[in-house]
Structures are given as C-alpha cells and as structure tokens.
Amino acid sequence: MGRYLIRRLIQAVFVLIVISAITFFLFWATPANPALLICGKNCNAETVAQVNATYGFDKPLVVQYGQYMQGLVSPGGRTIGSEGNERNCAWPCFGESYQNGIPVWNSIKDAFPATLWLALGAAVLWLFAGVMLGLIAALRKGKFIDKLSVGLALFGVSFPTIVFGYLLLFLFIVKLKWIPFPDTANAALFTVGPVKWLQFYILPWITLALVFAALYTRITRANMIDTMNEDYIRTARAKGLGERTVVFKHGLRSALTPIVTIFGLDVGGLLGGAVITEQIFSITGLGKFSIDSVLSNDLPAIMGVVLFAAIFVVLANIVVDVLYAVIDPRVRLS
C-alpha cells in the first residue's frame, strides 16, 4: 500500500505540473497583452513598458513560467516587482491580483471556507438521499416506490440548477419568509452560531444536492439491480444468510464501488467552487471569486483558482483509488 501511494503521489505531482503548464501558456501566450489588461484604455508606450517590467511580462514565457512555479514549490516563495521595487511573495505564491494587488493566495484562503461548507453539506445530502432512494427503488423494482424514485431522479436531472435555486429563494425567503435573506456574515459557523449558519446554507445545500442526488439515485438503482442478480448473491441466500446481510453486506457493498469513484471526483470538483449556486445565494466562495476574476480579466486569480481546484481533484482521485480497494476486495492495488 505504501509503495502504491508513493507512486500515485508522484503521478499526481506530474499531472499538476502538466495542468499548470497548459493553463499558464494558455493564458499568457494569447495575443492579448496582459499589460494592456492591467493599465486599461489609457495606456501609452511608457506605461506598458513599466507594467511589463513590474510584472515580468518582458521576459520569455518559459522564464515567467519557471518563476511562477518557483513561487509554488520554494518554501521562501519568490520575488516579484520591478527593479528597485522588489518584494517577497510568500509561499505558496500564486502572484498578485491585477485589480487590487492583493496576493491571490490570500483571496483563495478567504473564499475557501464558504465553498468548503457548501460542498460538504451538499455532499452529505446528495449521497444519503441518492443512495437510499436508489437502494429502495432497486429492492422494489417495478413497484410504485420504484417508479416514484425514477420520476424524482428524472425531475432532478432535468431541472436547471439556476431555476431551482431562484425558486427556493423566492418561495422560502421572499414569499413565506421562513428564512432571512442571505447575509455573508452568517457563513462563519464559529462566529454566528449553528442556527444562523444553517439558515444561510440550507437552501444552497438543497439546490446543489438536487442534481447530484438524482444522478446517484439512478446509478445506485442500476448497480443494485445488476448486483442482486449475481451468482454470489444467490449463493449467499442459499447458505441461509438473512436478507439484510445479503443486501447490505454483499449487495450494497459491490454496488457502491462506482458511487465512491464519482463521489470523490464530484466533491473534489466542487471544492474548486460551485459557481451558479454561490452566485444565486450570494456566497462569497471560490465560485464567485472565479466569476469576478474572469469578468475582470484577472489572470493570476484565474490561474490560482484553476490550480487550486486541480489539486483537490487529483487528491480526490487518489483517495478514491484507495477506498476502491477497501470496499471491493476484488480490486488489487498491484
């Protein structure tokens, strides 16, 4: 197991280097001049030259990429700024925002807790609801509960997140007034307490969980139906094992294997930001930070969010591989 993890970690580092290179050259090698994006429409040749010197745009792209990666791997960060105005960008250095000069890492740190709460809360909801509905539908195949579960899953997959989010917001906040309007101050659990925190996140959780729960319901149902028709399930029943043991120990365990795979990747992807949900409910997480960065052409911020999200996806992939072997003994790490 140890050698396997080391090999997977080395592969993960290689994947992250490739992603960083592609993202960097994709943004910085475009015909658009970053210096013009920074100084706006009133640029002149002298201003552009000054911006190029300040941010190092006058250096070859390979050198710029090397300096960027130095800030991510060197414990001391890297030096940024023009000659005579150098300053240290502490590790991990994703650069400074073109819009406000704030280190990108500081902005990511500020936005990440809101995205983390949103992703984890929604993940618990969709995993529990999706697996339970799929399990019940598979065990009651062809009956009313099965058709109801399939119908709900189809509804959830078909309903656009943006429509469902605004519908919940209008119904429970504007019309019924059961929940106060979203206040970003209530996103901090340890500052405002659990009641206001739950009021702030409950609708975003439901909105985000709807689509995923529907998908998990369909996958769990299909896998359980296939698994319950396997020979080893019939053998377990022939040995006199109880139906609960057959279903939960032998059936559900095998059926959950693909669920673990997509769950890890879904959560890893969401930790990079849930753009639509955060925008609807005014959550100042990484998704909203990404949108603001794209609209303002803030390349260091966009690059930072992309790499940050990629790290979570890669790490989630490793965790999934390990859990895969734990859940399904047929899988061998070798």
Image (spheres, rainbow, N blue to C red):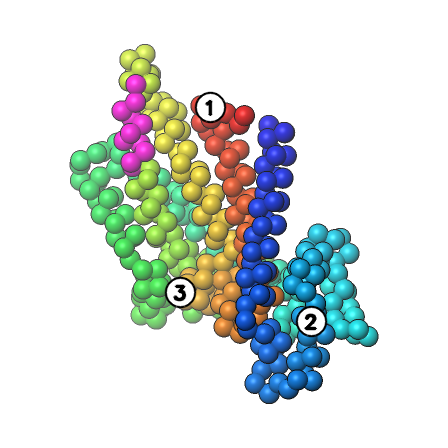
x, y percent for residue 142: 18, 35
Q: CA distance from mark 2 to mark 3?
A: 53 Å
Q: Nearer the viewer, residue 313 or 183?
A: 313
Q: Which residues are magenta?
A: 221-231
| Residue 307 colored in magenta in the image | no
Residue found at x 50% / y 25%: 332
| SS category of the residue bearing label 3 | loop
Residue found at x 53% / y 33%: 322
Q: Which residue is mark 2?
A: 58
Q: Which residue is mark 3?
A: 179
Q: Considering only order in the chain, which callout, 3 or 2, is on the residue closer to the N terminus?
A: 2
Q: Which residue is mark 1?
A: 329
139 vs 188, left or right, is: left
* Quarter of the image that includes the C terminus: top right
Total numbered circles: 3
Mark 1 Cα shell of 10 Å, populated few (<14), some (14-19), many (≥20):
few
